[in-house]
């Protein structure tokens, strides 16, 4: 992903992986055998690696040098907090709705999130001006 971000830009990689990531929870709905688990986890590792690289690169580019340590600390704190809170909420929802519904909801909400990000933050020309970030 490093070469891809160098060639196409961080925004391109962020959006490209951001469109793939919602497929990951949706794919769990269809898992019926252990080899499929390996495929989902490999795809997850690749997609999240690209997303996190591009996301962090953008964070570093957008923050002024004097505030970069605070910005990265806040970012990591929010990520860690969501890693704690998300499974708690997901577990409660899985108990009441079932795991397939939770995976479907997770995928759908992630698509809403990346759609809002593109529409409100980046704009529709993300793939025309790839080197914008």
Image: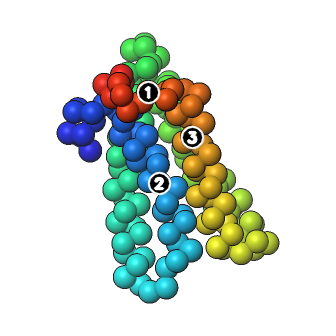
Q: Residues within 10 Å of mark 3 (few under 14, many from 20)?
A: some
Residue tagged 1 = 125
Q: CA distance from mark 1 to mark 2?
A: 21 Å
Of labels 1 and 2, the one closer to you:
1
Residue reaching furthest to the right: 96
* Residue drawn at (60%, 36%) of the image: 116
- Quarter-wise, where is residue 86 in the image? bottom right
State the CA–CA distance, disc 3 to disc 2. Answer: 12 Å
Left or right: where 43 falls relative to 117: left
Q: Is residue 56 visible?
A: no
* Image spot of residue 9 (x, y percent): 30, 31
Evaluate if marks 3 and 1 touch, with contact meaning CB atoms under 8 Å apart. Answer: no
Q: CA distance from mark 3 to mark 1?
A: 13 Å
- Dot 2, how many residues are within 10 Å of its Cα: few (below 14), some (14-19), or many (20+)? many
Closer to the N terminus: mark 1 or mark 2? 2
Q: Nearer the viewer, mark 3 or mark 1?
A: 1
Between 75 and 46, the one nearer to me in the picture: 46
Callout 3: SS = helix
Name the residue carrying label 3.
115
Is there a contact, CB below 8 Å, between mark 1 and mark 2?
Answer: no
Label 2: element kind: loop
x then y, percent, for residue 119: 57, 31
- Residue for point 42% across, 76% down: 37
Q: Which residue is mark 2?
A: 21
Q: Earlier in the sequence, mark 3 or mark 1?
A: 3
Residue 100, position as x, y percentages in the image: 64, 73
Residue 89 x/y as whole percent: 71, 59
Give the mark nearer the N terminus: 3 vs 2: 2
Badge 1: residue crowd in 10 Å (few <14, some 14–19, many ≥20)? few
The answer to which image quadrant residue 96 occupies is bottom right
Which quarter of the figure is the N terminus placed in? top left
> Which residue corresponds to the image point at 57% horizontal and 40% vertical from the top-left?
115
């Amino acid at each position: 992903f490093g070469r891809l971000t160098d060639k196409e830009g961080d925004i391109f990689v962020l959006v490209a992986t951001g469109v793939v990531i919602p497929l990951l929870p949706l794919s769990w709905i269809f898992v019926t055998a252990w080899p499929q688990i390996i495929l989902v986890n490999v795809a997850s590792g690749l997609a999240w690696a690209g997303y996190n690289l591009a996301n962090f690169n953008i964070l570093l580019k957008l923050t002024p040098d004097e505030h970069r340590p605070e910005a990265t600390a806040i970012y990591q704190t929010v990520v860690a907090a969501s890693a704690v809170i998300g499974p708690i909420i997901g577990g409660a929802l899985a108990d009441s709705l079932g795991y397939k519904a939770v995976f479907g909801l997770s995928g759908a909400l992630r698509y809403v999130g990346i759609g809002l990000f593109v529409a409100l933050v980046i704009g529709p020309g993300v793939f025309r001006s790839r080197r914008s970030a």
